[in-house]
Image (tube, rainbow, N blue to C red):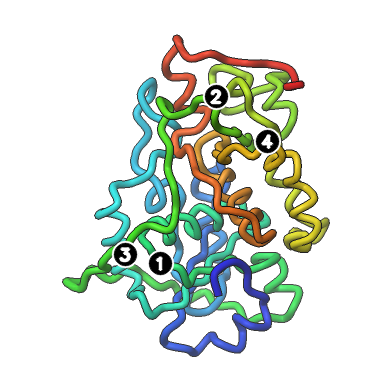
């Protein structure tokens, strides 16, 4: 499975030694909240994988975005410490409709690992379905075993690549942030000129499960209409992956990711900033 998995499918494989589960719960406004939630209760056998500590390298103010990607070799070592090999089915979940888990989904694909799926509906769906809960933590185990990266399944672009005349940029943040009406996290408000706003939250139903493939295709019609290659971004390269997952669920071509996203874009004052809505 390489996009979404149901709680029922996961429950049936909890004892499967070839399955590895990662709890990616995280709150941007409270970086310890996810780890505390994991300690209070999690899907049995799951590892806690932190956005700040495991899925990012430290932020350098004024130089990087808020959640820079770790070196690929460092991430591969983390993956090996979870016992993941290329025969593993990886399942990732959070309590935010996949907003954080999609980052790890994308990062596994970055290493060329295809069998990774997001738990549809996340922690809430697991609990609603009566899934087992454990408080027994599981720690990474340093190992001499290596996770050998395969050819990457994803495309990455840099700030220097972002030519809106030849690329269709897609901003996953909500409309007020895109327009520049408000900016709770970064020092400059607005968006990259030429970008379309397609909030990641619009990929979800009220119960935080993903919309149907047909509904997601409909949502992304405006994104694909130009025929240009699509590049996804957000505030720091996290929720952009949610749009990328949604497009894959919809059966659309895989877009590229601008990992630094808005928080990196604005570190260079010579880069243009747009506000309001694009027409």
Of circles 2 and 3, which is in front?
3
Q: CA distance from mark 4 to mark 2?
A: 29 Å
Residue at 80% in and 56% down: 215
Element class at badge 4 = loop
Q: Is residue 59 above or below residue 240?
A: above
Label at residue 150:
3
Q: Which quarter of the image is occupied by the C terminus?
A: top right
Of circles 4 and 2, which is in front?
4
Residue at 33% in and 68% down: 140
Q: Is residue 1 above or below residue 267?
A: below
Q: Within the image, what quadrant is residue 185 found in?
A: top right
Q: Is residue 139 left or right of residue 97?
A: left
Q: Is residue 83 left or right of residue 51?
A: left
Comes first in the chain, label 1 or label 4: 1
Comes first in the chain, label 4 or label 2: 2
Q: CA distance from mark 2 to mark 1?
A: 32 Å
Residue 229 drawn at (x, y percent) = 56, 40
Q: Is residue 56 above or below residue 66?
A: below
Residue that sits furthest to the front in the current view: 227
Label at residue 226:
4
Q: Which residue, given by chain and number where applicable, does mark 2 sit on?
A: 186
Q: Residues within 10 Å of mark 4 (few under 14, many from 20)?
A: few
């Amino acid at each position: 499975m390489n996009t979404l998995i149901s709680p029922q499918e996961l429950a049936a494989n909890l004892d499967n030694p070839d399955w590895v589960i990662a709890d990616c719960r995280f709150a941007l406004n409270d970086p310890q909240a996810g780890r505390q939630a994991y300690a209070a209760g999690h899907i049995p056998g799951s590892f806690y994988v932190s956005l700040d500590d495991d899925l990012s390298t430290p932020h350098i103010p004024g130089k990087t975005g808020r959640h820079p990607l770790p070196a690929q070799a460092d991430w591969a070592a983390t993956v090996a410490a979870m016992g993941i090999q290329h025969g593993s089915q990886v399942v990732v979940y959070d309590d935010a409709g996949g907003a954080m888990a999609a980052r790890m989904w994308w990062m596994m694909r970055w290493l060329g690992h295809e069998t990774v799926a997001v738990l549809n509906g996340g922690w809430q769906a697991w609990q609603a379905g009566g899934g087992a809960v454990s408080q027994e933590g599981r720690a990474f185990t340093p190992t001499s075993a290596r996770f050998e990266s395969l050819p990457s399944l994803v495309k990455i672009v840099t700030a220097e690549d972002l030519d809106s005349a030849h690329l269709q940029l897609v901003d996953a943040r909500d409309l007020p942030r895109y327009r520049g009406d408000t900016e709770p996290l970064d020092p400059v408000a607005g968006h990259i000129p030429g970008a379309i706003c397609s909030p990641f939250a619009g990929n979800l139903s009220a119960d935080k499960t993903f919309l149907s493939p047909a509904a997601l295709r409909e949502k992304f019609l405006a994104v694909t209409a130009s025929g240009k290659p699509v590049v996804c971004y957000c505030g720091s390269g996290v929720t952009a992956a949610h749009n990328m997952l949604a497009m894959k669920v919809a059966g659309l071509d895989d877009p590229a990711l601008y990992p630094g996203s808005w928080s990196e874009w604005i570190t260079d004052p010579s880069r243009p900033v747009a506000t309001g809505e694009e027409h």
